[in-house]
Amino acid sequence: MELRETIEGMIDKPLGRMRDKEAVEWVLRRRLTKKEFKVFMGPLRGVSDIQLQEKLKLDPKRLAEIRSSIRRKLNQDRIKQELYETGKAS
């Protein structure tokens, strides 16, 4: 699965056309914690949930909480404006 497709699957109300892959990844690195970023990018890089749990020392409940936190952050207007080409992002 591609980065943009994954993000669009998490965002409730998209704002139009998404920026290029490098810009989107930069926004994610800046706006998510290190652990959240690793959990988000893991499946895109072919890392299973079990491997993520072992590497980041997480239990299944905490992994689900982190994924929920990522979804919540991606749906914040400020972050959505940075991910999409709205002309409002800095």
Image (tube, rainbow, N blue to C red):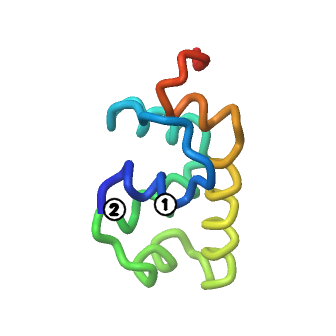
Q: Is residue 57 above or below residue 19?
A: below
Q: Is 28 left or right of 44, judged from the image as shown?
A: right
Q: Quadrant of the C terminus?
A: top right
Q: Quadrant of the N terminus?
A: bottom left
The residue wearing badge 1 is 9
Query: Residue at position x 55%, y 59% from top?
Result: 10
The residue wearing badge 2 is 44
Q: Nearer the viewer, mark 1 or mark 2?
A: 1
Residue 2 location, x and y as percent?
30, 56
Q: Is 4 left or right of 39, judged from the image as shown?
A: left
Q: Label 2 is placed on what type of residue?
A: Leu
Secondary-structure class at tag 2: helix
Q: Is residue 6 above or below residue 58?
A: above
Residue 3 location, x and y as percent?
36, 51
Decide: few, some or many residues near mark 1? Use Cα within 10 Å; few <14, some 14-19, many ≥20. Answer: few
Sequence order check, earlier mark of 1 and 2: 1
Q: Is 10 left or right of 51, judged from the image as shown?
A: right
Q: Which sits in the foreground, 34 or 9?
A: 9
Q: Which sits in the foreground, 47 or 25?
A: 25
Secondary-structure class at tag 1: helix
Query: Residue at position x 71%, y 43% from top?
Result: 76
Residue 77 lies in what quarter of the image? Answer: top right
Q: How many marks?
A: 2
Q: Label 1 is placed on what type of residue?
A: Gly
Mark 1 to mark 2: distance in Å?
Answer: 13 Å
Q: Is residue 41 above or below residue 73?
A: below
Q: Which sits in the foreground, 44 or 8?
A: 8
Query: Residue at position x 47%, y 53% from top?
Result: 8
Q: Is 39 left or right of 77, judged from the image as shown?
A: left
Residue 39 location, x and y as percent?
50, 63
Residue 42 location, x and y as percent?
40, 64
